[in-house]
């Protein structure tokens, strides 16, 4: 169905030869990626999707819609995930040749979700509601299928805006739906459908303006809060496992733990910051306890259990004894493990982050660490913080989220900042503060509104003492999750489909 006002650029693009048309699709997708951190140009994401929606409205059928969605998605993910080449450059001689294939291959795979959404929306009539619903449902699928990879959802463009606070009700999927609605509303307004466009954009504007008041804590009493020390050694990935540099970084963390005129209540080191296996760590734990001066320490290291190796987090008591252990359960495909690893190992293929064997093993899902007077912590290691469902899998509500990570794998341009942005989103969804400690940065204390209260910049070694913010009461999203938004999306899609079928019968 044609729009009431067909802008000239749509006709010009549709009249282009295949390769030039594809380049325009790629460019529009890449434009949309500029809403992601560190750029944060969310108006360009809305503009990009509005232009893509204009082209989608003129597609002749599902096949052409899939082509548009797939190519635009490829452009979007190739820019948004450009940091994905960084892990392959740590050991260039061994992995460097894989970098372009990894970027293009992963981007093409994720773009297939866009293609699927555009195909389904075209089959459902090609209207704004159909595309918003199908696109958001595809984003949900992307977070689950093949272990999931929900990184760089278009809704993440809202994270640095007041819209972030609505995640306490609607989560990241709701943010994606509202951004898609803003794009469709902009197109409707420009194309002459002023009532539809005006109502949609006004609704999104109301959500934007009311964002600061929807996630206000029920209690604001001023009480003395525990002091947490964040330790950031800044160990470059190509030096991290160098035998000559490992003691340098370890001793740096000991120095930071002992520093300062006063003692914090807890000291946190980043992921794999202890350069020995758990079985051989008694001497290291003793040194850490001495440096901490009787303060509990949380740190990351690796451990062996028979033939299995785990990426783990340990809590050391005041005397250096092992008080708690957590094993990472959501592993990075082709990074920490390779699907069908035993078979693939015959061809010399293993996870690029694996130090032993054919990759890491997964620990049990959903754990809480009781830190006594400090409260209960929900532990996460690196990649796990991008999955909202992993936080909701905890057996009980924590007092704060504890994330240790090694973002040195992500380079220095966009990856670490996107990972940090998603951490802020998790805090808002759950209404919980987060202690985020990263090897190379950005280490940060994040409050339950997603605000960074203290931080250590990317690429700097140092430490900072930060008071642990108060948690909010359980948010609507923390209690219910994605079920309400998914139910609404399915009902809307069913309604759109039924209306379209009814229209066919009357013609």
Image: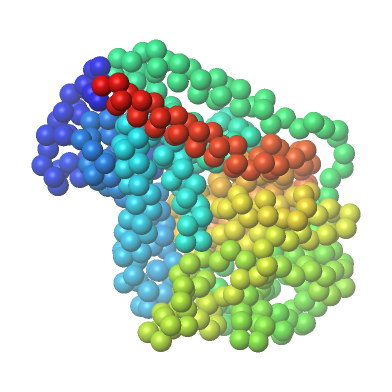
Could you tell whether 383 is left or right of 448 in the image? left
Could you tell whether 323 is left or right of 462 in the image? right
Q: Give residue 298's quadrant in the image.
A: bottom right
Could you tell whether 499 is left or right of 160 in the image? left
- Could you tell me if residue 149 is visible in this image? yes
Q: Give residue 273's quadrant in the image.
A: bottom right
Question: Compared with residue 211, is residue 394 higher up or lower down, i.e. above or below?
Answer: below
Location of the N terminus by quadrant is top left
* Residue 317 placement (x, y as % from top left): 85, 69
* Residue 254 placement (x, y as % from top left): 73, 70
Residue at left offset 50%, top offset 33%: 491
Q: Give residue 290's quadrant in the image.
A: bottom right
Residue at left offset 59%, top offset 75%: 361
Question: Compared with residue 73, is residue 339 higher up or lower down, i.e. above or below?
Answer: below
Residue at left offset 29%, top offset 26%: 504
Could you tell whether 1 is left or right of 397 in the image? left
- Could you tell me if residue 157 is visible in this image? no
């Amino acid at each position: 169905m044609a729009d009431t006002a067909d802008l000239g650029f749509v006709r010009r693009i549709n009249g282009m030869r295949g390769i030039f048309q594809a380049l325009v699709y790629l460019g529009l997708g890449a434009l949309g990626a500029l809403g992601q951190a560190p750029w944060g140009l969310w108006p360009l994401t809305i503009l990009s999707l509005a232009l893509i929606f204009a082209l989608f409205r003129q597609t002749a059928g599902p096949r052409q819609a899939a082509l548009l969605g797939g190519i635009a998605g490829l452009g979007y993910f190739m820019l948004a995930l450009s940091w994905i080449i960084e892990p392959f450059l740590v050991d260039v001689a061994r992995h460097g040749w894989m970098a372009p294939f990894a970027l293009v291959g992963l981007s093409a795979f994720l773009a297939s979700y866009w293609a699927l959404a555009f195909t389904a929306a075209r089959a459902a009539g090609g209207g704004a509601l159909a595309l918003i619903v199908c696109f958001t449902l595809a984003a949900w699928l992307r977070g689950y299928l093949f272990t999931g990879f929900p990184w760089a959802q278009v809704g993440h463009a809202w994270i640095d805006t007041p819209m972030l606070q609505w995640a306490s009700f609607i989560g990241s999927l709701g943010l994606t739906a509202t951004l898609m609605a803003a794009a469709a509303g902009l197109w409707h307004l420009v194309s002459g459908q002023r009532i539809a466009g005006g109502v949609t954009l006004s609704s999104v504007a109301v959500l934007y303006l009311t964002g600061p008041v929807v996630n206000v804590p029920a209690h604001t009493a001023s009480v003395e809060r525990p002091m947490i020390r964040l330790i950031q050694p800044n160990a470059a990935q190509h030096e991290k496992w160098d035998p000559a540099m490992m003691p340098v970084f370890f001793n740096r963390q000991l120095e930071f733990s002992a520093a300062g005129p006063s003692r914090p209540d807890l000291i946190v080191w980043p992921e794999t910051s202890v350069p020995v296996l758990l079985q051989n760590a008694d001497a290291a734990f003793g040194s850490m306890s001495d440096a901490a001066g009787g303060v509990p320490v949380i740190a990351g290291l690796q451990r062996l259990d028979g033939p299995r190796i785990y990426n783990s987090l340990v809590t050391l008591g005041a005397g250096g004894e092992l008080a708690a252990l957590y094993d990472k359960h959501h592993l990075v495909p082709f990074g920490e493990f390779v699907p069908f690893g035993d078979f693939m190992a015959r061809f010399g293929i293993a996870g690029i982050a694996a130090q032993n064997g054919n990759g890491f093993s997964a620990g049990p899902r959903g754990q809480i660490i009781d830190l006594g007077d400090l409260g209960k912590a929900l532990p996460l290691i690196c990649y796990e913080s991008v999955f909202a469902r992993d936080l909701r899998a905890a057996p009980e509500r924590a007092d704060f989220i504890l994330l240790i990570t090694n973002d040195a794998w992500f380079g220095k341009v966009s990856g670490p900042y996107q990972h940090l942005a998603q951490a802020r989103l998790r805090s808002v969804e759950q209404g919980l503060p987060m202690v985020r400690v990263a090897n190379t940065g950005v280490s940060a204390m994040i409050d339950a509104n997603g605000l960074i209260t203290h931080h250590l910049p990317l690429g700097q070694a140092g430490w900072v003492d930060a008071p642990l913010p108060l948690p909010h009461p359980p948010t609507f999203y923390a209690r219910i999750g994605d079920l309400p938004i998914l139910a609404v999306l399915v009902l809307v899609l069913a309604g759109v489909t039924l209306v379209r079928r009814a229209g066919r019968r009357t013609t």
